[in-house]
Amino acid sequence: MGETTVTALEGRTAASSPDANDAQDRPARAFVRRLRTQRRPRLWYELALIAVSYWLYSLVRNAVPEQESEAMRNADWILRAEHSIGLAFEQSVNQAINSVTWLIVGMNYYYATLHFIVTIGVLVWLYRRHPGRYAAHRTVLFVTTGIALVGFYLFPLAPPRLMEGHGYIDTVLVHQTWGSMASGDLKDMTNQYAAMPSMHIGWSLWCGVTIFALARVPWVRVLGLLYPVATLVVIVATANHFWLDAVGGVLCLGAGFAYARAWYGALPHRLSREVPGPGAPSARARAAERESTYELAESGDRVG
């Protein structure tokens, strides 16, 4: 009996030893390591992923209860907050640009189309020219959008154009242009109160930062920086967003980049352009090596 007890205790000790736990954790760590490894994107998989993700995004966004009274209260709160800091300029911009017909009509079409066209174009460019960085940049976009969905649910917000008595102009209705699905005959197909955060800003800034970080032609990099700035003017001029909605979009994008940095061990643009070959160190390993080298150099400077 004594021998049996000792054997059982030894078995439990062995099972709970670091080596045994390490062996049990290896499959999980290997799975996570595979997810973090840069690999060449597959076209059919990426097309399916983007299509399904956008379908889910639209489904969830439009399924959020359209809480009109709460959305209007939140809009009043946003407007009061902007007035309190002296930056409630949306109405002035909206009315001024609306007086220039060709300009506001162009902005209506800009708002309705470039949001999708430019984002898809940047994804295609990454897929073709930067395959090693594609998955990380795509992850930033997906995380940003996922956080935005939480914002739509927790903070329903009416856009300025729906606030009666404040002098805002719904430029799509006034100029009868094909534009936002949140105006005109298409308004019943989408959630009117999913304005905070602004994904027009979140997506356009993602495009701009990506282009600026990776493009080699100077004027293309400048256009990348100008694109989110122009988008900010458009969303305010068309009375689709407050400027604070844009701040929300920037914060969501920042969280997306922070997630990618933690997951891949480096910011997306610092990953290798091409997919590393077999046996090449991972992005996290390269980042750790750079950090170790920096610490050694720093300690050497202190000794010297």
Image (spheres, helix red, strand yellow):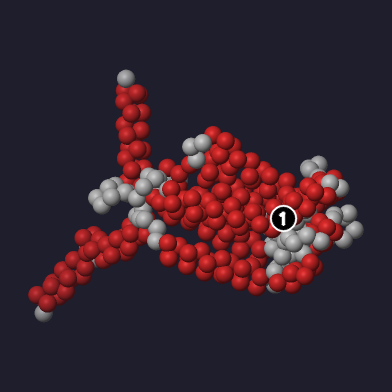
Please state if 41 lies on the left or on the right of 215 as rendered.
left
The quadrant of the picture occupied by the C terminus is top left
Residue farthest to the right? 165
> Which residue is depicted at the point 42% across and 48% down?
130
Name which quarter of the figure residue 156 lies in. Answer: bottom right
> Which residue is depicted at the point 88% across and 54% down?
167
Which one is nearer the viewer's eye here, 252 or 74? Answer: 252
Name which quarter of the figure residue 270 lies in. Answer: top left
Residue farthest to the front? 102
Residue 52's place in the image compared with 131, above or below, is: below
Instruction: Tell me residue 174's x, y (percent).
Output: 85, 59
> Which residue is depicted at the point 45% across and 44% down?
269
Q: Residues within 10 Å of mark 1 (few under 14, many from 20)?
A: some
Name which quarter of the figure residue 73 lies in. Answer: bottom right
Q: Secondary structure at mark 1?
A: helix
* Residue occupied by mark 1: 109
Q: Amino acid at mark 1?
A: Tyr
The quadrant of the picture occupied by the N terminus is bottom left
Q: Could you tell me if residue 19 is visible in this image?
A: yes
Instruction: Tell me residue 152's x, y (percent).
Output: 66, 63
Count numbered badges in the picture. 1
Instruction: Tell me residue 113's x, y (percent).
Output: 66, 57
Residue 222's place in the image compared with 82, above or below, is: above
> Which residue is depicted at the point 78% across and 53% down?
105
Residue 248's place in the image compared with 152, above or below, is: above
